[in-house]
């Protein structure tokens, strides 16, 4: 029987779908390419009069993960500056769509992925939106496979080329900072209860989905047992830390040791030249009192970590972005002196600790072990950072509320592929890992289903760009992933595959990466071009494995 003609959109490429996007006649087939342990995705938007549609996959080789794509609002376009203190969002709607964005805000985009384990896909405004993640069965061999995707009366043949190569696991370190407060608040769970820890476990598994290897426990004054004299107790962290290690994390990030302190109005003192003790923010670190508190704090922390055998599984943040937002060179010199003092205390009592820090420059030499410049900071001082790499130090990359404009980032009004290309930039520049601040950073009052621009409480600039502060959504049963999270997952997988190619054939690696990435402002974000380059990566690795 001849199949009915259906209207909609279908894609296996890294691109956003929109509720109001133009549609055409749907094809009856789609081709995909993947490693043996890859997990490609398919988006399907289908016009229908039904209230809901059933989706299914006929395959002996793959297990389907079905998601109902939910649209979320993008209320602002991102600005075009490259500094955090600039106009991060365009509060006054521009007359024309900025060239570096996908659409003129406000608009809606399918980013949220609501699990549909029963394959039932909800319909809204006459359209059903499906995301399918293809999960290969254990031991899948290389070769050509066919699967039949059905949704309602529509049927699509998936022709899947599985290359004889596997993605190396956990070889490219990734960390996204998460908020325990947001987990508690968004899911209505009291902290330190079995239900709360079960929800945190679901978030940890979502982090592991995107190959996150580190988890950040932000220490706060909950560890202060007494103040006269200062004593500290970290036992309350034990179940949380064990949970993350049980879920496969390799390292924990702890911090911070220093604080900016606060202005009289309660806002952070962003331009301070006097770092304070994180657990006693009224005390400068370089006073006798501040030094004593910091020593007692680190001594107690070291004893706690040794008690559970975690002392060698720690990286530490002394102070985030210590070389950003300072008044003048004298302020920077004062910060350096205070930072090195704190680093000395930390290394005295935790001799195997490595200091990791988001920075804009290599100015804090000797204080930092894992350098994490923002992409503009790296490119501005690339020779200096590459010299640190040559010395055997680790250099990663990060993005956050900046950079903006043409710079690669993962905002909701940017092309979806840009979030994946960030990892190709890491490969091109031989960077060893990736950091982002926003896994589920929802401050009180923020509902990402109603607004995706995060309020900015630093006192600098506008709200943060849409989608900047999160990759997951607080679903009814746990964290719901987003399309940008899936792009980040595949980006981390690409970084691991590219590292494998570089070890085998550095010239081929560089030539391949150059086809889509020159620098973080100059790249090819055409999904069709990237699709071809990605398959060439798989081909090169398969052929190299046969040599």
Image: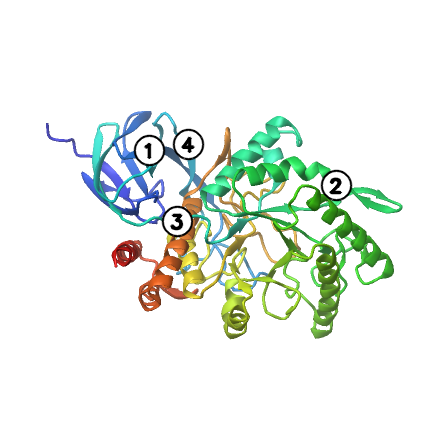
Q: Position of residue 63 (x, y in %)?
A: 32, 33
Q: CA distance from mark 1 to mark 4?
A: 11 Å
Q: Is residue 476 above or below residue 240?
A: above
Task: Please report whichever mark, 4 or 2, sits nearer to the chain's N-terminal start.
Answer: 4
Q: CA distance from mark 2 to mark 3?
A: 37 Å
With 427 as the anchor, is 88 left or right in this view?
Answer: right
Mark 2 neighbour density, 10 Å: few (under 14) some (14–19) many (20 or more): few
Q: Nearer the viewer, mark 4 or mark 2?
A: 2
- Quarter-wise, where is residue 127 in the image? top left
* Residue picked out by circle 2: 222
Query: Which residue appears at 31% of the width and 31% of the height?
Result: 126
Query: Which residue appears at 86% of the width and 57% of the height?
Result: 289
Which image quadrant: the C terminus?
bottom left
* Residue picked out by circle 1: 64
* Residue picked out by circle 3: 490
* Residue picked out by circle 4: 115
Query: Which residue appears at 61% of the width and 51% of the height?
Result: 456
Task: Please report whichever mark, 3 or 4, sits nearer to the chain's N-terminal start.
Answer: 4
The local secondary structure at tag 1 comes to strand
Of 376 and 459, nearer the camera is: 376
The local secondary structure at tag 2 comes to helix
Task: Please report whichever mark, 1 or 4, sits nearer to the chain's N-terminal start.
Answer: 1
Q: Nearer the viewer, mark 1 or mark 4?
A: 1
């Amino acid at each position: 029987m001849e199949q009915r003609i259906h209207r909609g959109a279908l894609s296996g490429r890294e691109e956003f779908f929109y509720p109001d996007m133009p549609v055409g006649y749907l094809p009856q087939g789609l081709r995909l390419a993947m490693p043996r342990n890859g997990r490609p995705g398919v988006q399907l938007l289908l016009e229908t009069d039904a209230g809901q549609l059933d989706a299914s996959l006929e395959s002996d080789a793959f297990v389907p993960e079905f998601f109902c794509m939910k649209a979320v609002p993008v209320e602002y376009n991102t600005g075009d500056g490259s500094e955090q203190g600039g106009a991060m969002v365009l509060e006054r709607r521009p007359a024309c769509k900025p060239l570096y964005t996908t659409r003129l805000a406000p608009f809606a985009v399918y980013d949220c992925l609501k699990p549909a384990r029963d394959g039932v896909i909800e319909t809204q405004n006459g359209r059903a939106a499906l995301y399918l993640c293809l999960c290969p069965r254990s031991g899948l061999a290389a070769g050509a496979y066919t699967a039949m995707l059905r949704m309602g009366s529509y049927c699509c043949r998936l022709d899947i080329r599985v290359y004889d190569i596997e993605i190396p696991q956990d070889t490219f370190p990734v960390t996204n900072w998460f908020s325990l407060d947001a987990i508690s608040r968004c899911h209505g769970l009291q902290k330190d209860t079995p239900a709360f820890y079960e929800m945190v476990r679901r978030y940890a598994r979502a982090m592991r989905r995107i190959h996150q290897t580190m988890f950040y426990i932000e220490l706060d004054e909950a560890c202060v047992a007494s103040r006269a004299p200062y004593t500290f107790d970290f036992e309350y962290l034990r179940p949380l830390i064990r949970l993350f290690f049980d879920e496969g994390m390799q390292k924990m990030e702890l911090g911070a040791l220093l604080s900016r302190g606060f202005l009289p109005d309660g806002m952070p003192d962003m331009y301070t030249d006097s770092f304070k003790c994180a657990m006693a923010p009224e005390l400068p670190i370089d006073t006798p009192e501040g030094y004593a508190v910091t020593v007692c704090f680190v001594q107690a922390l070291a004893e706690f970590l040794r008690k559970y055998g975690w002392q060698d599984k720690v990286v530490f943040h002394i102070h985030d972005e210590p070389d950003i937002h300072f008044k003048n060179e004298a302020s920077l010199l004062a910060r350096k002196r205070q930072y090195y003092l704190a680093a000395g205390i930390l290394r005295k009592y935790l001799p195997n600790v490595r200091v990791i820090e988001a920075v804009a420059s290599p100015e804090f030499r000797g204080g930092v072990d894992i350098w994490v410049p923002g992409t503009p900071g790296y490119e501005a001082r690339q020779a200096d950072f590459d010299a640190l790499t040559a010395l055997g130090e680790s250099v990663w990359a990060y993005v956050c509320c900046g950079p903006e404009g043409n710079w690669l980032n993962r905002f909701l009004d940017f092309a979806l592929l840009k979030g994946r290309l960030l990892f190709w930039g890491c490969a091109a520049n031989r960077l060893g890992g990736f950091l982002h601040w926003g896994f589920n950073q929802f401050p009180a009052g923020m509902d990402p289903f109603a607004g995706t621009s995060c309020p900015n409480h630093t006192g600098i600039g506008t709200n943060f760009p849409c989608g900047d502060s999160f990759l997951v959504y607080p679903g009814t049963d746990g964290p719901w992933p987003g399309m940008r999270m899936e792009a980040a997952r595949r980006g981390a997988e690409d970084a691991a595959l590219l590292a494998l190619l570089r070890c085998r054939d550095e010239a081929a690696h560089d030539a391949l990466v150059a086809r889509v990435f020159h620098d973080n402002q100059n790249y090819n974000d055409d999904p069709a071009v990237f699709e071809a380059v990605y398959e060439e990566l798989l081909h090169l690795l398969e052929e190299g494995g046969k040599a």
